[in-house]
Image (cartoon, grey):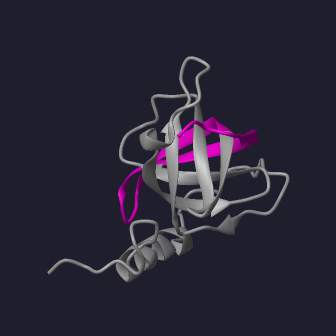
Amino acid sequence: MRERKLFPSSMLTHRDIEQIGNLLERKSTKAPPKERRSSKRLPHPVIELVAPHVDQRLPAKWMLREVHCCDLSEGGMSFFLPQPPDFEYAVVRLGTPSKPTYMLVSVVDYRLDEGVRIGYVVGCSFIREVKIPG
């Protein structure tokens, strides 16, 4: 049985939200990594759009792909990828389709996460807002 989306492609299913929530609440047996953020991070279990920024060229809107986000702060965000990122910079669309904000981000780190979803959590810092071509 196919699970129904709560809202057209920009939102998660109830199961996705529950899985991401479980991942975020999961207690680790390792010592927590040193906090480098200057602002508080908040859970951000939604789908946003991301495209690599390669060769100093902004991606077109059609190049954006959905990613499941983990958290968001004033200085950056993190999201899941099925494989390690092969880019240093990306453009992230935040907000709603009718009022999007496009941010240029720098990949700060990534780590393998074998929690609910096997993949990589990619941590990014916001650089600046950008306008991307249609």
Q: Is residue 118 magenta?
A: yes
Q: Residue furthest top?
A: 55
The residue sitting at 45% across, 76% down in the picture is: 17
Indicate whether 66 appears above or below 22. above
Q: Nearer the viewer, residue 75 or 65?
A: 65
Asked if residue 122 lies left or right of residue 117, the reply is: right
Write down the region rendered in magenta. Answer: 105-134
Asked if residue 60 lies left or right of residue 119, the reply is: right
Q: Residue furthest right?
A: 38
- Measuring from the top left, give residue 107's x and y in whole percent: 61, 36
The residue sitting at 59% across, 47% down in the picture is: 92
Indicate whether 96 appears above or below 13. above
The residue sitting at 59% across, 40% down in the picture is: 91
Location of residue 42 by image quarter:
bottom right
Asked if residue 54 lies left or right of residue 94, the reply is: left
Q: Main secondary structure of the magenta part?
A: strand
- Measuring from the top left, give residue 94's x and y in whole percent: 62, 57
